[in-house]
Amino acid sequence: FHQDNICKSLHSVFLFTFVYILHSFTTFLELGLYLFRYMELKKKVLNGGGVNAIAHHTQKNKKVLVRDRLRMLLDDEDYLELSPFAGFGLPYGDIPSAGCITGIGKINGLWCVFIANDATVKGGTAYPITVKKQLRAQEVSMQNRLPCVYLVDSGGAFLPLQSDIFPDKNHGGRIFYNEAVMSAVKIPQVALVCGSCTAGGAYVPTLAEEVVIVHSIGTIFLAGPPLVKAATGEEVIPEDLGGATLHSEVSGCVDHFAAVESEGYECTRNIISTLNFELPEENTTEVEEPLYSAEELMGLAPKSYNYSMDVRLIVCRLTDGSQLQEFKARYGTTLLTGFARIEGHQVGIVANNGELTYEASLKGSHFVQLCDQRDIPLIFLQNTAPQPVHTLSQAKGSMMSAVACASTPKITVVIGGCHGGDSYAMCGRAFDPNFLFLWPNARVSILAPGHADALVQEERETVHINEQLKKESTAFFSSGRLWDDGVILPQDTRKVKFTMQKHKCSAV
Ligand code: COA
């Protein structure tokens, strides 16, 4: 080398190293921020309605906190909480856990959906997001045929937002409608009244099939003592108006009287053991762990579409023994399809590995139909191109049809981007997956931030829309609005494991 060339080469090497270190640092920083936000929201969720409301609930009202209630209701093992971050960042404020905790857990060995009001959040009243969360939990119960248990402690509708809760089809009344329909299709429902059930809160236990009430803290009435006084002039205490004694001895509205809260959970657990309800047998064969550590998944989570790596690096950290029997490995290579086992369950994996081309869509459509024909549940690992599709090919339409019509259980995990029409073909929320989870780095929007120029010509508007996309596409923005079933850490993806059969699927 000429000395000049050596200098130039050294300069390039330094520049490259500097850019590489800077990029690694910003990626590291960004991943750290996702994790920080995740932890921050988790802490807020655990704090419910705040210190004062917790003191009011436990000391004045002498009630147990909702998460401790769940510990008494459920078997002593892990349970899956659905959409814990729902309710954050809404136009009407932050509503921790949307005012109610929902999820799936075992009661006396039987997987059940639970819906538990958190009365530390404005007396357990129902905001629009609370209604949405309860409806989603009922949908999970119906779609997967799981019994549903309600822990009711609610002041009914949050009155200032009544027009967003009462009149429409998917507003509050739908919860009661669903209860009736669920009973008709033989999905058992049990309610435990462990607080005030006023107005809308009163319908939930009344429509359940078997009801327990806790003495002195449980009440059921359409209007409380202040309204009785206003309407009739009569002074009455809550216990006499609709307490445990009245409803278990006079109205017959409830079936079991529990003297204290702990007895209420014991009684509810006993009821579950009499349901005579059977779920598919669980896999008991020994499970092979992946050969590569799941801890590395956070580092592999695509920061943006530009940084996507071969999706096999992710798949081999999710499947048993890191195995995947690829289907059509040499055709439509921007979509990875194949059979694998996760925690012993056979699944079909459909994972984006680049743009969803004509060939990739054709392959996706073929594979989805194959899994449907063989009753094999589908796992979609979604990371779609940042821009909406400008042309909808027949192949993409065919994949969308195959996904929509497949009756096998479907679970979508957004590992990167969820944008435009490709997200439909990859079983986005509108395509009704049994569950949809997001990694914290996920972006959900019609097109990814920075790509507004694909749709908008005017420069100032482009900048404005890009900013809006950046703000509105984060995983936490999505989860706050219940567009998914929760944000999960990449390393926990296998732990959110699934027990599935056709039309029956429970996640833990
Ligand atoms: N709409 C809006 N806010 C309500 C509400 C409702 N229906 N019910 C209660 N709240 C608010 C209270 O104003 C209070 O707010 P704050 O903490 O900012 O002061 C908070 O929820 C807790 O209520 P509070 O009465 O202090 O707690 P409590 O545990 O003693 O009683 C209830 C809780 C729900 C039993 C009681 O508030 C009640 O009976 N509310 C009226 C219920 C009703 O009539 N609903 C009709 C809906 S159609």
Image: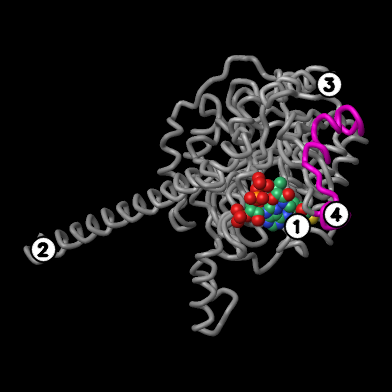
Mark 1: which amino acid?
Gly
Q: Is residue 406 left or right of residue 312?
A: right
Mark 4: which amino acid?
Gly
For residue 147: magenta?
no
- Of the numbered discs 1 and 3, the one sitting upstream in the chain is 3
The image position of residue 36, as x and y in percent, is 41, 48
In front: label 1 or label 2: 1
What residue would you read off at disc 4?
233
Please tell me whether residue 169 is drawn above or below residue 66 in the rendered image: below
In front: label 2 or label 3: 3
In front: label 2 or label 4: 4
Magenta residues, dominant SS class = helix
Can residue 132 be seen in the rendering of this structure?
no
Q: Nearer the viewer, residue 302 or 187?
A: 187
Sort mark 2 into few (<14), some (14-19) or many (20+) by Cα contacts within 10 Å: few
Q: What is the number of the mark on residue 326?
A: none
The image position of residue 52, as x and y in percent, is 52, 47
Q: Which residues are magenta?
A: 227-254
What residue would you read off at disc 1?
397
Mark 2: which amino acid?
Cys
- Of the numbered discs 2 and 4, the one sitting upstream in the chain is 2
- Of the numbered discs 4 and 3, the one sitting upstream in the chain is 4
Q: CA distance from mark 4 to mark 1?
A: 65 Å
Sort mark 1 into few (<14), some (14-19) or many (20+) by Cα contacts within 10 Å: some
The image position of residue 78, as x and y in percent, is 58, 26
Determine whether label 2 and label 4 are within 8 Å by CB: no
The residue depicted at 73 percent of the width and 45 percent of the height is 134
Mark 3: which amino acid?
Leu
